[in-house]
């Protein structure tokens, strides 16, 4: 069995976002509609349940793409047809499908700005919208916030480990598809990288891009020195020569002998601590103290830390796989839960009591408290209107589906992240796990939870 | 600093694929052009260096999306402008940018069909094309093949662990962005899942979709029994009731008492081995032996294996996070390397000798040998034209950029995978690592490597 259709791209499409969700969101939305509940005002919140074992903090990222989704969300005619003919939807009232043609997100969004450091239990965003709308968006919001938060958090650790030396995202080939590569480049920049190897990310996001050479360039010439020379002729101002194709130390000697213009050399294999020292010595002996050393090859925050501790004279790091997929833990336990619902007797709090997965009711705000030295002392998650000291983290983004003010440029989110990291208790910046940053639930939340837990279900 | 532009989607776009690559691919392509090498015929191969520690085999997937890329690849005017003004490209000959406007992939592609079991060192695909074209496509080909191969390989293990019980992909919310969710749904299906929760994947790929209920549905009603009843009224043929919102065993009793139509119940938390038995007993005591039990909640192949070994009466598994991001190892050491290049003295083999990253020269074919019982005995990687026993795995897909025959439907790739798994040495299907499946390089390849290694570099 083959097919005559052209090969499928599986690219998301701004005109066809409606079905990019789990089927149950759509059955539930239809069910709410059938029972007259679709327009009840509902509040949902999205938060992370636990930190990965190997993280002390998270960096929120991905909000801009979530906003794009909420603003463009609609169902294309062929998507509505798909549901109309789906066996599960046989008994759904016919007018629900008509209503889908006009489906738009009309709710309010509050969110933590991108680049903010966040912790488990703290809402990254809060949606207040008609129940059916608030339900349908769950899957997309989680994936969109999660992937960038995962990568930005890893990138922040990596940048901290590099201690001010530039780190570039080299991970597009390891990210989970071409869109994931763009998302990873964006998140890595917010988290503290200085740029990316991804050319389209550079164009779309206006962030610096770095390119060096692949082994294929070197292998395309009979002679390594000729390969260096020929490259530098075309790229005299951007010539980072890859010296490890055959033998790294011989490679740097050939680069020098070739007379090729070079700003840097790259080492992509072998013992980087040893080789970087040998290469530095060769360069310095030739009076080329200006030539920088770029290191890459399965690097992560731990290896960078160890290299620098060993005194490796590396100036720039290219980090791919480990950061772009957050290899030590590529997932977050992010959830999106109903916390408040309008009923005939007014808004009521909602909780879930599943074993190990219980939730707190009502719309919330997060307050971050700092000492006189500016260092964060701890956060309190409180009810939205509960008086509480500290800086509130959630800010209004969409009102009735419309953007309240332009979103920050990615550069601003990156600056926010750096400033947040500067104010974290310094032990949280260590690579190993340390005791958790203090986050507590307010008395108002505990009391609300208690009263609902005591109620009969 | 804010921005007036609308929020960015970062969706890939079939009319703008050119820059979705690492910058160095583009500098090298320009360099080849500047030196008259851009049209030299080059052969590159893509393979995986090592198996992840927790895998005994891989399932090739993602070829269709790679073909879509190669067929649609072009540079949009704004992408060419971006490069024209990029500081690295200052000294690039101006006519190279003009040439980019007409850039198309005109080469040949050989590839292992999707669903084929593959091992380290075996080319998943081989490109023969003008050097500049073959270079530019590296990044996109690796990411596209890798993500689906990672997920299909994990899905195959998961389906094997489930021993014939259906496994659904529930991972769209954990995948690395909305496109990654579609790619994961596709790959999981090829690897052996019976369907997905992703509605758009269901529509685009024509694969079964499963939806149940979220906790939000239950929490939207004051009474759990009412929530069950109201759902089943709208979905009488597709009613899987979620029973763990408050208390699982009480939940199934309420489902029965509610009189709601139900085909299945879902448990998403707690000790699934214990709870599934208790729930089964309650259902059976009520004469509802027809009601199936769906289990979900951080499942993976190990947990499924343990549950079934413990006799848990689970009929259907929903697997999310662990499969959609291949949590135990989300990356593959896939590389794409120049192996052969046309020169003034004819085609010559190319190798890389970097420490731990050496490669074999020349275009290759993989031959798989089976015993009289049909079980695979071992593979040989040989030079393309070298006589060798066994079934060749690489087949021609594109000739001069054009599809030779329609691609198989995803269903066919799924069938291929199942048949391949049936013929694997059974110990490779165990969840723990076992001694490697035998893959060896042919005498012809060893000789070719030897002669190049002896040559002076």
Image: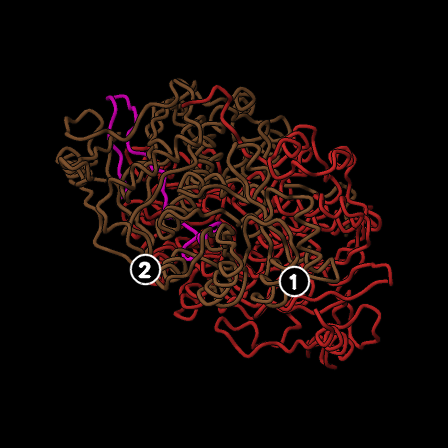
Chain colours: A red, B brown
The residue drawn where x is 64% and y is 40% is A204
- Taking the spot 74% from the left edge, 58% from the top edge, the residue there is B221
Residue projecting furthest to the right: A345
**Residue B374 position within the rendered picture, expressed as x and y whole percent measured from the top left:** 19, 36
Question: Which percent across, then down, holds residue B414?
Answer: 39, 36
Read off the chain for label 2.
A
Q: Badge 2 is on which residue?
A: A271
- Quarter placement of the C terminus of chain B: top left
B152 on left or right of A410: left
Chain letter of disc 1 in the image? A
Seen from the viewer's position, the closer of residues A438 and B456 is: A438
Mark closest to the chain's N terminus, 2 or 1:
1
Inspect the magenta stretch and tell me whether residue A290 lies in it.
no
**Element under disc 1:** strand
Q: Which residue is mark 1?
A: A47
Question: Do circles 2 and 1 both sit on a common chain?
Answer: yes
Q: Residues within 10 Å of mark 1 (few under 14, many from 20)?
A: many
Q: Tell me residue A435's x, y (percent).
A: 55, 79
Q: Quadrant of residue A1?
A: top left
Q: Is A435 or B282 nearer to us in this picture?
A: B282
Q: Magenta span covers which residues?
A: B323-352
Visible in this render: residue A186? Answer: no
Q: Is residue B184 above or below residue A291?
A: above
Q: Closer to the camera, A249 or A267?
A: A267
| Label 2 crowd (10 A; few <14 / some 14-19 / many >=20) | few
Q: With respect to residue A165, does A30 lie above or below?
A: above
Residue furthest bottom as drawn: A372
- Indicate left or right for A415 with A436 as reference: right
Residue B332 is inside the magenta segment = yes
């Amino acid at each position: 069995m083959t097919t005559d259709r052209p090969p499928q791209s599986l690219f998301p499409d701004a005109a066809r976002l409606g079905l990019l969700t789990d089927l149950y969101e759509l059955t539930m939305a239809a069910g709410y509609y059938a029972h007259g509940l679709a327009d009840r005002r509902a509040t949902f919140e999205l938060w992370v349940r636990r930190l990965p074992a190997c993280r002390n903090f998270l960096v929120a990222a991905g909000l801009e793409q979530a906003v794009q989704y909420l603003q463009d969300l609609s169902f294309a005619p062929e998507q509505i047809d798909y549901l109309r003919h789906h066996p599960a939807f046989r008994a759904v009232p016919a007018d629900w499908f008509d209503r889908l043609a006009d489906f738009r997100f009309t709710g309010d969004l509050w969110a933590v700005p991108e680049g903010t450091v966040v912790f488990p239990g703290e809402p990254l965003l809060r949606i207040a919208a008609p129940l059916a709308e608030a339900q349908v968006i769950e899957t997309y919001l989680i994936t969109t916030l999660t992937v960038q938060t995962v990568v930005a958090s890893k990138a922040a650790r990596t940048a901290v480990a590099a201690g001010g030396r530039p780190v570039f995202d080299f991970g597009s080939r390891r990210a989970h598809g071409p869109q994931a590569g763009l998302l990873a480049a964006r998140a890595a920049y917010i988290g503290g990288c200085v740029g990316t190897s991804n050319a389209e990310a550079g164009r779309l996001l206006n962030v610096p891009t770095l390119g060096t050479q692949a082994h294929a360039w070197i292998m395309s010439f009979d002679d390594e020195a000729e390969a260096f020379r020929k490259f530098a002729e075309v790229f005299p101002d951007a010539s980072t020569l890859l010296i490890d194709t055959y033998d790294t130390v011989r490679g740097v000697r050939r680069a020098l002998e070739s007379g090729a213009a070079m700003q840097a050399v790259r080492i992509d294999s072998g013992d980087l601590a040893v080789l970087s020292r040998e290469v530095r010595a060769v360069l310095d002996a030739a009076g080329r103290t200006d030539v920088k050393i770029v290191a890459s090859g399965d690097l992560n925050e731990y290896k960078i830390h160890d290299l620098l501790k060993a005194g490796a004279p590396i100036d720039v790091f290219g980090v791919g796989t480990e950061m772009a997929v957050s290899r030590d833990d590529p997932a977050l336990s992010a959830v999106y839960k109903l916390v408040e619902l309008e009923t005939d007797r007014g808004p009521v709090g909602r909780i879930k009591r599943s074993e190990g997965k219980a939730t707190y009711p009502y719309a919330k705000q997060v307050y971050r408290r700092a000492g006189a030295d500016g260092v964060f002392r701890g956060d309190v998650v409180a009810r939205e209107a509960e008086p509480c000291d500290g800086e509130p983290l959630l800010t209004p983004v969409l009102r009735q589906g419309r953007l309240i003010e332009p979103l920050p440029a990615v550069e601003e989110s990156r600056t926010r992240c750096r400033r947040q990291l500067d104010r974290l208790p310094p032990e949280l910046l260590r690579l190993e796990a340390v005791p958790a940053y203090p986050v507590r639930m307010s008395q108002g939340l505990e009391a609300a939870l208690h009263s609902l837990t005591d109620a009969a279900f």
